[in-house]
Structure formats: structure tokens, C-alpha cells
């Protein structure tokens, strides 16, 4: 097990730091003798006030000030849209964050999942602790250095601003600490394209649940591991993980190409997952009574492109959805003997990379595409297929094209069905509030920045962000992965 302090500087934010402010001048030393340059031109105080403090008519001065204000608006820096100059860097506005940390791993982890723990729900105290699993993406020449990482993030404190504000009201909470990343790993010989975790309840209430992971590798295999002992080792000093505990419970080899789509059913506690590949095939794998794993020999087929994302319905145990590079999202019923989709909808003219099924309002589905557009769909408006070759084209409930690069991750807030988090190839992670609607008067007052939708709550800069997840037990907390892990909570959510 390795243990090291994490970097506490931010990799994101919304404010621009482009240099130092000019030093304030000492007016008392330089003002000298005051001369009234207007004393011969104006005879009374009223005339001076009418002309304005600078000697010009008010109308002329106000017109110039308005022009200057418009010029500033035109120069507003939009993160992800505008490009930084060579001598400019982005720095976070810490006043906008309740918590912000960056934690680095030996190799980038382009996919991860958060592990629900036994520390309690709705946690608001600091420093915070959380657990996660991730798969690395080592360089091709160093593939043998890849690993499945089981991680514990601890010492996640508030920003310094919040700590100072809380000092007078609480002596016990928010202890100052350095963020720490502890990890134990399982050796892999291939990079991980996607990883998802699943917990099965323990037969004995005094024991923790069993935590399983499914890793879709670059080699096209799906590896299923039991990482329960690895998670327990963080809180039991001296624990040694045996080679047997590092071995997969099962290695699934039914895919003929690599893939990026994996999901466990949240409604089947014993373990059932679907996996999809670049050939457009989707396979169903179920845990058997003898603790083995059985994969259906017949795949679900119908996509003409790669399967990019799979998600089970949060309310129907036999239903899952798939997103594809063919621009469609399909909804499937595992009981179908034909193995064809029940619904097929054309949601984009480009690749549909990601999607998210709302757990609060289960007829809502969000999608993110390669052209930077993300949208929200009402599944009640989707009609059953009349022809598998001609998918329907309903209208989205909402659609946004703020991002100009591909959408790499999208996820609904776990308890608020109006909040959505989106990650994109423009190095930004954005938060959106779908409940915001502007009337005609409000829509006129946009501060001159017409490219920013009113539903956009927050923009976090994060280098090469690939995937994000809300923490289900620490309200409002987001974890994102790219070049490093970012753990943050904004004051707006």
C-alpha cells in the first residue's frame, strides 16, 4: 500500500490571473498644490455641476462610460471557449468553492467509480473521507505498469476561506489537514477503458458489503474482481493482500473487440452486468448460484457503430439503454427473445459518447455527443420501433451547445433532478440548473455575454477531464478524473 500527501493546489476554477495589480500611489506625497483649472471658465457651482466633474457635459461622459462598459463585456473570458495567451494561467476563485483538492496518481485514470462506504449518508463535516476505484492508462510501451487502483481520499478539508469563517463558531469541526491519497493496486497488463463498481449486501450484518468491480480493458476482456479485502486494508494497518486476492473472479472473453461500455444493474443485488464493444455487440452476464459467472451466448445487436455507453434503468430491473457512435440511443428489454431494441431514437448526427438516467425522475435521460451538444430526453415521448432501420426523432426537453468540444461525461445530481454535471473536451466541468427559466426582461440583462446560457451554474477548469461522478453520501461533492483527480464542492450546489 502506498501513502502520500496529495497536491493541494487547484487545477481548475473560473477566474483569470494575468499579472499583478499596479501598486497604489501615495497621493499625500504627490498631490501638491491644488489648482482649479475651471475657475475662469465657470462662474458658479451650478455651472460646474452641470458640466460634470471632468468639465464635459453629462450626456457625453455617460455615452463614453457606456461604450467602455460594452468593450469590457466583449472581452469577457469564457473558460473553455476563449484561449489563454502564452503568459496567462487560470487560477481558481476560492470564494466560489467550499472544498477544492487535486490528487495525483502514477498514471492518468480515465475511468473511475465511487465506492459507497459505511461512514454515513448526508455527510457535511470536514475533513472529508471517500473511497474509489479506478483503472490506469499507462503509455503503450509501459503497459505492464497498468493497474486497478483501490483508493482512499482523506484529509479533504474546506477551503481556507471557509475555515477562517468557521473558527469562531466551531472548535471541533473542520480540523486543518493535508489531503492524502492512499492506494492499493491489482496489477493489469492492459489499460482500462471503463470501470464500474457494484456492492452486494453481506449475509452477516456485522460485515461490510462485498464490493465487485468490472473493468473493460483495452485488450477486449472484462475482468471481475472482489476488492472488499483491499478496501478493508485501509483501516487495518499491517494487512497484506495475497496474490490470490488479486486474481479476478472471472475473465470474460466474449467480446471480439475492445469496448467502453459497462454497467451493473442497481436492482439485482447478486450481480448482473451488460458490456458493449466497438463492433456494436452487447452481452449480458449474470452471477450464478455457484458463485460463477455466465454470459448469454447471443448478444443484443442493432447498433451500426460502437457501443459507447450502457446504463440500466433505475426502476425496471429488465431494462437498459445503450448509446452509440451511430448517433442513436436504444432501449432494450433483456426478456426479449429477438435480442432487438424496444426503442431506437436518433439523438445526434455525431457520436453519442455518454448518457445518464435520472434516479429521481426515471423518465428523464441525458445524453452527450461528439459535437459538444448535450440534451435531456423524456422517455415517455419515445415511441416503439416500427422499423429497426429507421429510428424515431423526437424533440429533446432541453438542449445545450455551450461546449464546442466532445462531451466526455454527464451525470444527474443524485437527489436533485434539476442539476446536471457535464464534462467536455474543452477542459471544463460544468454544472447546470434546468429549473432556471428567464422571462423577457431578465433575458435582456445578460451582462453582454450572450453565449452563456442562464442555466449554466458553474464552470470548473480541469485539464483533460474524462469522467465525473457525484458522491452519493457527501452532498454536492463532485469527483472528476483526467490528468489528475479533482475533488470539489461549490457554494452554488
Image: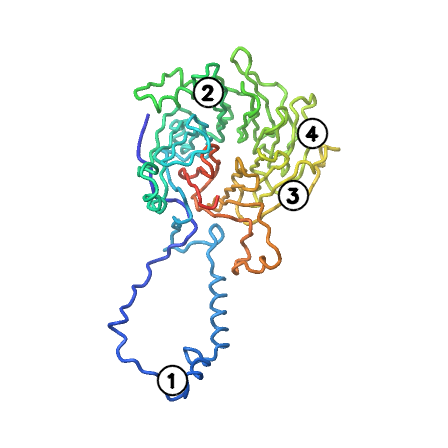
| Mark 3: secondary structure | loop
Outermost residue on the front side: it is 169
Tell which of 333 and 304 is nearer to you.
333
The spot of residue 19 in percent (x, y) is 34, 58
- Label located before the other in sequence (4 or 3): 4
Dot 1 corresponds to which residue?
A: 38
Q: Which mark is residue 12?
A: none
Q: Is residue 23 left or right of residue 357?
A: left
Which residue is identified by label 4? 342
The residue that mark 2 highlights is 209
Gap between marks 4 and 1 measured at Cα: 83 Å
Q: Residue under label 3, please give it.
A: 396
Question: From mark 1 to mark 2, how far is it between C-alphas?
Answer: 83 Å
Q: Quadrant of the N terminus?
A: top left
Marks 4 and 1: which is nearer the front? 1
* 3 or 1: tag closer to the N-terminus: 1
Number of the front mark, 2 or 4: 2
Amino acid at each position: 500500500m502506498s501513502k502520500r500527501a496529495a497536491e493541494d493546489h487547484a487545477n481548475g476554477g473560473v477566474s483569470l490571473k494575468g499579472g499583478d495589480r499596479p501598486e497604489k500611489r501615495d497621493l499625500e506625497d504627490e498631490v501638491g498644490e491644488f489648482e482649479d483649472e475651471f475657475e475662469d471658465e465657470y462662474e458658479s457651482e451650478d455651472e460646474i455641476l452641470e458640466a460634470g466633474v471632468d468639465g464635459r457635459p453629462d450626456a457625453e461622459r455617460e455615452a463614453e462610460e457606456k461604450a467602455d462598459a460594452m468593450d469590457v463585456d466583449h472581452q469577457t473570458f469564457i473558460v473553455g471557449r476563449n484561449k489563454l495567451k502564452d503568459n496567462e494561467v487560470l487560477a481558481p476563485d476560492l470564494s466560489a468553492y467550499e472544498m477544492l483538492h487535486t490528487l495525483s496518481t502514477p498514471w492518468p485514470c480515465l475511468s473511475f467509480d465511487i465506492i459507497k462506504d459505511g461512514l454515513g449518508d448526508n455527510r457535511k463535516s470536514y475533513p472529508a473521507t471517500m473511497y474509489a476505484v479506478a483503472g490506469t492508462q499507462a503509455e503503450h510501451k509501459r503497459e505492464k505498469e497498468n493497474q486497478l487502483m483501490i483508493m482512499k481520499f482523506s484529509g479533504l478539508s474546506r477551503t481556507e476561506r471557509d475555515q477562517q469563517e468557521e473558527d469562531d463558531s466551531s472548535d471541533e469541526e473542520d480540523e486543518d489537514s493535508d489531503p492524502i491519497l492512499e492506494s492499493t493496486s491489482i496489477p493489469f497488463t492492459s489499460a482500462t477503458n471503463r470501470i464500474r463498481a457494484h456492492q452486494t449486501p453481506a449475509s452477516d450484518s456485522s460485515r461490510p458489503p462485498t464490493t465487485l468491480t468490472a473493468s473493460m480493458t483495452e485488450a477486449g476482456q472484462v475482468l471481475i474482481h472482489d476488492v472488499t479485502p483491499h478496501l478493508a486494508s485501509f483501516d487495518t494497518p499491517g494487512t497484506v493482500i495475497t496474490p490470490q486476492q488479486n486474481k479476478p473472479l472471472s475473465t470474460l472473453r466474449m467480446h471480439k473487440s475492445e469496448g467502453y461500455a459497462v454497467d451493473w444493474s442497481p436492482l439485482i443485488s447478486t450481480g448482473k452486468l451488460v458490456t458493449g464493444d466497438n463492433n456494436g455487440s452487447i452481452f449480458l452476464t449474470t452471477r450464478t448460484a455457484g458463485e460463477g459467472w455466465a454470459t448469454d451466448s447471443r448478444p443484443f445487436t442493432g447498433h451500426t457503430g460502437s457501443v459507447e455507453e450502457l446504463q440500466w434503468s433505475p426502476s425496471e430491473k429488465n431494462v437498459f439503454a445503450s448509446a452509440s457512435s451511430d448517433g442513436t440511443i436504444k432501449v432494450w428489454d433483456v426478456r426479449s427473445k429477438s435480442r432487438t431494441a424496444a426503442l431506437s431514437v436518433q439523438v445526434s448526427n455525431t457520436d453519442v459518447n455518454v448518457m445518464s438516467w435520472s434516479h429521481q425522475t426515471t423518465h428523464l435521460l441525458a445524453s452527450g455527443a461528439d459535437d459538444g451538444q448535450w440534451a435531456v430526453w423524456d422517455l415517455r415521448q419515445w415511441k416503439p420501433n416500427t422499423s429497426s432501420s429507421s429510428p424515431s426523432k423526437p424533440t429533446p426537453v432541453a438542449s445545450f451547445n455551450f461546449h464546442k468540444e466532445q462531451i466526455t461525461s454527464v451525470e444527474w445530481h443524485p437527489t436533485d433532478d434539476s442539476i446536471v454535471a457535464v464534462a467536455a473536451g474543452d477542459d471544463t466541468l460544468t454544472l447546470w440548473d434546468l429549473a432556471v427559466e428567464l422571462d423577457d426582461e431578465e433575458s435582456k440583462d445578460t451582462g453582454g455575454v450572450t453565449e452563456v446560457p442562464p442555466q449554466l451554474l458553474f464552470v470548473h477548469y480541469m485539464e483533460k477531464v474524462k469522467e465525473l461522478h457525484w458522491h452519493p453520501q457527501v452532498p454536492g461533492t463532485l469527483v472528476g478524473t483526467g490528468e489528475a483527480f479533482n475533488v470539489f464542492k461549490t457554494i452554488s450546489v
